[in-house]
Amino acid sequence: MIKNILLISLGILLTSCAQNKSNHIKEPMQNTDPKKKVVYHVFSRLFGNTNTTNKPWGTIEENGVGKFEDFTAKALSEIKELGVTHIWYTGVPHHAVITDYTQYGISNDDPDVVKGRAGSPYAVKDYYQVDPDMAVNPANRLEEFDALINRTHQAGLKVIIDIVPNHVARKYESLNTPEYTVPFGANDDTSVAYAKNNNFYYIPGTDFKVPQWENGYVPLGEKSASADAQFTESPAKWTGNGARDAQPAQNDWYETVKINYGVSPEGHKDFASLPEDAGHWDHQKHFNFWKDKGIPASWKQFKEIALFWLSKGVDGFRYDMAEMVPVEFWSYMNAAIKMERPDAFLMAEVYNPQLYREYIFKGKMDYLYDKVELYDTIKHVMQGHGSTDHFAPILKYQEDIEHNMLHFLENHDEQRIASDAFAGDAAKGKPAMVVSALISTAPTMIYFGQELGEPALEDLGFGDPTRTSIFDYGSVPSVVRWVNDKNFDGGQSTPEEKELRDFYKRLLNFSLENSAIMGEYADIQWHNRQHTEWYNDRVHSFVRWSDTDKLIIVTNFDAKDTFGFELQIPQDIIKQWNLNDGTYKATDQLYNEEQATLQVQNQAGTMRVDIKPLQSFVFKLE
């Protein structure tokens, strides 16, 4: 009875998803990619740091910091061989830091408006420079990053960096802005709350006040003369998350100020609206649309920032909190980027599924985080209280945009799989990773240390355990062992870490090499849940195929039980595969050890599957 209720609910959900999709643009984006894209997301200042002190609130001298030069040719070669096409260097633009760099002409930042001792990479202080922490010689920091771009390209990888369009550091102070543009705030009229060409929103006649600290929080973790609850900002500006009070709350993004994109405090837009059919335009037509339009100053400044980094050899951007910025700006910005670099990789955080198509079709985004739908659903299954029946409706709802939804199981904002707050065991990420990487043509992203089962146990100060801190100086224990005194060979890795990395390497490289992964997809979960005895919602199955490859993928998310059943391949798939009645051998592509037999009779297929806890099969028909 319970099974029938679940199946009925799934059928209703599939119908609902199809109906919801009809309210949006239906025409799918053209998938012109010949192969899968895999992004290695690395928090740059932590990657090469082998100092294991990890003192809470430790200074750069106490806890150490990784450098651009730590990404050696050997390190980058190993990352590429993991099955990676792009590397996202997180935390590159110069953000507010506590370390004193005044000898290099950089002003000190106030700990009252900096999160952590190392600072948030999303409080950018200078968009035309890079983080001085990661340079061997801070005076030559940009040149050292230029060299890293070159090494990355020589390794056969593409470079992605962050652009944070919604906010900048409270003390934005660019020393390197080119002559053809201006630093943020330099031309603002601070006597008014809002003007179209102001970069910031103001609270005229009122000075900024440092938040009232609660729950025992103290900047830098201790009393300090520099953290005196005083920071001069007159008049006060709106805070990055949109808080309009001169004294933001502790949980506001108090270290940042919000950028004005020509939207008044009342919500009026001082720029042209895109026509309804703009979602069907190519980037050239979007670019032409804005040529004769009045553009708010912030739009132009961010466009110049993007073009500056493209000229340096950067291959794409990850846009922080993109949905907090008008979609019209993205039409303008991304069209300009694509005019320079048609192959630029543009991915963004957009968490509202109702906005996905707006930002893909009208905003000309290449890829959006699939966080709220696929990631959250897989996470529930990994934690033991979700159903694999819910994967297929997500793919159905995203049918026209599935190629544009970037899949991940970890990133710098999310808990580590191995942490107790998530799954408590990195092995529980194996079946999830098979589904995440192979279920669609979307790019795959992994977070450095994920392939080693990093649990993020350390309390480094501002950041909390379960997430590798992005605010503090420190190191990542599993990565330190793999880095192995800068040999980058896993020489100190545990057997479990080596086995897990080998699994990721096999899976990711297979996703790059097999033509079916960029080919056709069909769900067989629904059919087997209806017709197959012993089949249940702790396992999951789907098929993929191309002209040359036919795959049957089966995963077991259960950490305790082995399941056995006669997996059924429906008639419509057998017909599309042009299989005659008979016997077909299939071999697992991950480890090339398991074999199975597909029996086709009366144009319907069955395959005996016995699958162990947390095991996955990627069967290829011979």
Image: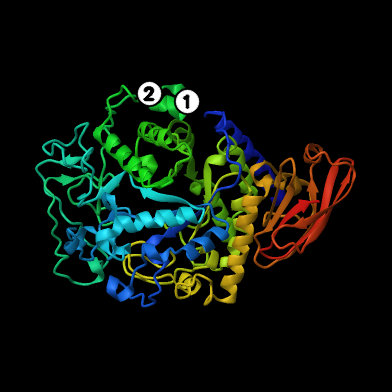
Dividing the picture into quadrants, the one containing residue 201 is top left
Say what amino acid the circle numbered 1 marks. Answer: Trp
Asked if residue 50 is positioned above or below residue 378 in the image, the reply reads: below
Q: Measured from the top left, where is residue 342 in percent x and y?
A: 46, 36
Res. 284 image quadrant: top left
Residue pointed to by mark 2: 289
Q: Does 316 sit left or right of 257 as displayed?
A: right
| Location of residue 414 with respect to 293 vertically, above or below | below
Q: For numbered disc 1, what is the local secondary structure?
A: loop
State the residue in front, 260 or 81. 81
Q: In this view of the protein, can residue 150 be seen by the observer? A: yes
The part of the image, by quadrant, that contains residue 197 is top left
x%, y% of residue 6? 67, 47
In the rendered view, would you say 494 is above or below 619?
Answer: below
| Residue corresponding to mark 1 | 281
Label 2, secondary structure: give it.
Answer: helix
Left or right for 156, reference 49: right
**Marks 1 and 2: CB-CB under 8 Å?**
yes
Residue plotted at (38% across, 24% down) = 288
Where residue 600 appears, x then y in whole percent?
87, 46
Closest to the observer: 313 or 490?
313
